[in-house]
Image: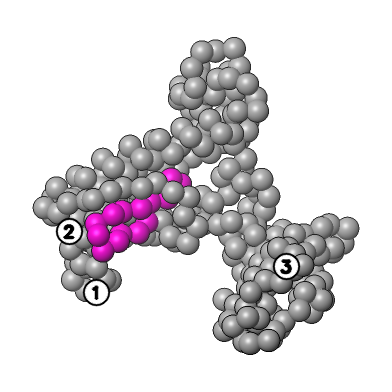
Amino acid sequence: MSHRAMLYRRPSEPLAIEVVFDRDIYLVRLRRHRHARRYTLRVQAATRDVVLTMPPCGTVKEARDFAQKHGGWIATRMCRLPAAAPFAPGTVLPLRGVPHRIVHRRNVRGTVWTEIDAKGEHLLCVAGEAPHVARRVQDFLRREAKRDVEAAARAHAATLGVAIKRITIRDQTSRWGSCSTTGALSFSWRLVLAPRHVLDYLAAHEVAHLVEMNHSTRFWRLLAKLCPEMRRAKTWLDAHGADLHRYGADASGSLAALTAGGDED
């Protein structure tokens, strides 16, 4: 079998395996990589997945043995994660940096709206049947993110005199935003969970790439003029950005890595 052929998943090869440790079961996703020379484990924070990377000639049996051997490592990393915060009644999530408690209003007309109760608590109210609460909350957050991002991005584009071809809102796991060479911008809907100055900074960041498609000194100088709160926003993201990925999740996860030779940062 050629080296290239070995990269493809065998018909009988599972997409994932189970690891049992201390009476808990962890699902481990398998992936092959042509440059991998050994088995490695990684827990991805954004997707909350445990991923085992296999070398081209690796076997599922070897992968299973490796994962099971490091079951304690998997359990430790998973336990270190902040608790998941599903979109369910009672969950408190930040909307533009302000904590809001999800409240289900089954018999009230409407979809999702915000209000402040008599005690001054901010509420995110959701109408309709209980099975639809999570979807309605996420749809609402995506709409709010799109509105805020578009307003901020187009304001910065007007300042620089550049044109935006398209703005897309996604659930990106590896970056908060991106800019293509064609002028299309993409942002994570989770930015609506961050304070307004953080969203504004990231909108400015991607718009600045329409002028400087790099991270050169000129780019950062341009961005600093465009967004005076750049440093404050970057500091907030470094401290709290990863935490935004736990909202809407049903299970825990953490960013960490392990190889046969030990941990990787």
What residue range appears in magenta?
A: 177-191
Q: What colour-coding does the image apply?
A: one colour
Q: Which badge, 1 or 2, comes first in the chain's sequence?
A: 1
| Cα–Cα span, label 3 and label 2 | 55 Å
Of 32 and 39, the residue lying toward us: 32
* Residue 178 position (above or below residue 92): below
* Disc 1: which residue: 216
Residue 190 within the segment the image draws in magenta: yes
Given the image, on which type of amino acid does mark 2 rest? Lys
Of 131 and 11, the residue lying toward us: 11
Viewer-nearest of discs 3 and 1: 3
Q: Residues within 10 Å of mark 2 (few under 14, many from 20)?
A: few
* Residue 158 position (above or below residue 106): below
Q: Position of residue 167 (x, y in %)?
A: 31, 47
Q: Position of residue 223 (x, y in %)?
A: 22, 61
Q: Which badge, 3 or 2, comes first in the chain's sequence?
A: 3
Q: Quadrant of the C terminus?
A: bottom right
Q: Any mark on residue 134, and which?
A: none
Q: Is residue 43 visible?
A: yes
